[in-house]
Image (tube, helix red, strand yellow):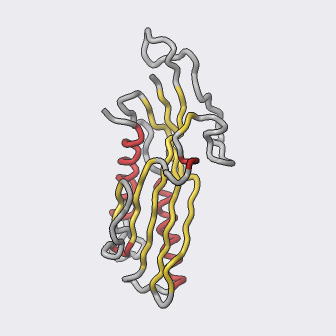
Amino acid sequence: MTMIVDLLLHRLKTQLTAAMIDNVDPSDVTRAGIVKIGRFQDSPLPLDNGTFISISGGDQQDPELADGILDVRAASPGWQPGFWMASREVGGSADPGEEGHGNAMWWRRGRIQIGCFYINEQLEEEVAATAAYETLGRLTYAIDHCPVHGLKDSYGELAVKMFAFASNFFESGGPPKQYIWRGSVKWQCLTERSR
């Protein structure tokens, strides 16, 4: 049996591994050292460029990242999808002869953590900032272009479209050349449960 969130996490891992590692020149300081599902708990210093990407569903520190049925309350604050969708279809059914199980649109949500620990690279502060924001930009772009359409779980839930909808990113570390940038990108995926 599969559940849509697990399928989304694995699709994100495949997409981000290609975008952040496989398709980036090994000598490029913006290349990530690892893309993983779950919390990154090791030292980032042995990684290529000290950069990690970790993917999770939900966020225990942010109740706004709870999965939810599509309605005004379940949309991201201040964000609407730009098209009208009914959150539930009453009385419809994916299976002929089955009654009362209508379709439902859901937001499945999560967070991707990013860390750029430029300790070994000994980058100047502005060079580290430029590299970090290039890495963040590549990450956000890859999320928005993650091909989830058609993923379907064992419970009849079908993925429609993935969006990155918020991020935070900040500098720590410091002089002389030990700059660290870290933060997260929040994602949500529109899904349809059909049975």
Q: Position of residue 99 (x, y in %)?
A: 49, 11
Total number of numbered labels? 0
Q: Residue furthest front?
A: 61
Quadrant in which the C terminus is drawn? top left
Could you say where residue 57 lies in the image, as x and y percent from the top left?
Answer: 44, 48
> Residue 6 sits in which quadrant?
top left
Residue 157 is left or right of residue 188, and the answer is left
In this view, which residue lies farthest toward the top? Answer: 97
At x 45% / y 39%, what residue is drawn?
149
Q: Quadrant of the N terminus?
A: top left
| Residue drawn at (57%, 22%) of the image | 89
Residue 32, image x, y percentages: 38, 68
Q: Is residue 95 positioned above or below 78 on the image?
A: above
In front here: 34 or 147?
34
Residue appearing at x 52%, y 77% in the figure: 172
Q: Closest to the observer: 174 or 130?
A: 174
Q: Is residue 51 above or below residue 8?
A: below
Indicate left or right for 137 with 9 as reference. right
Residue in the picture at 44% in, 68% down: 115
Query: Which residue is farthest bottom?
Result: 176
User: Is 169 drawn above or below residue 107 in the view shown?
Assistant: below
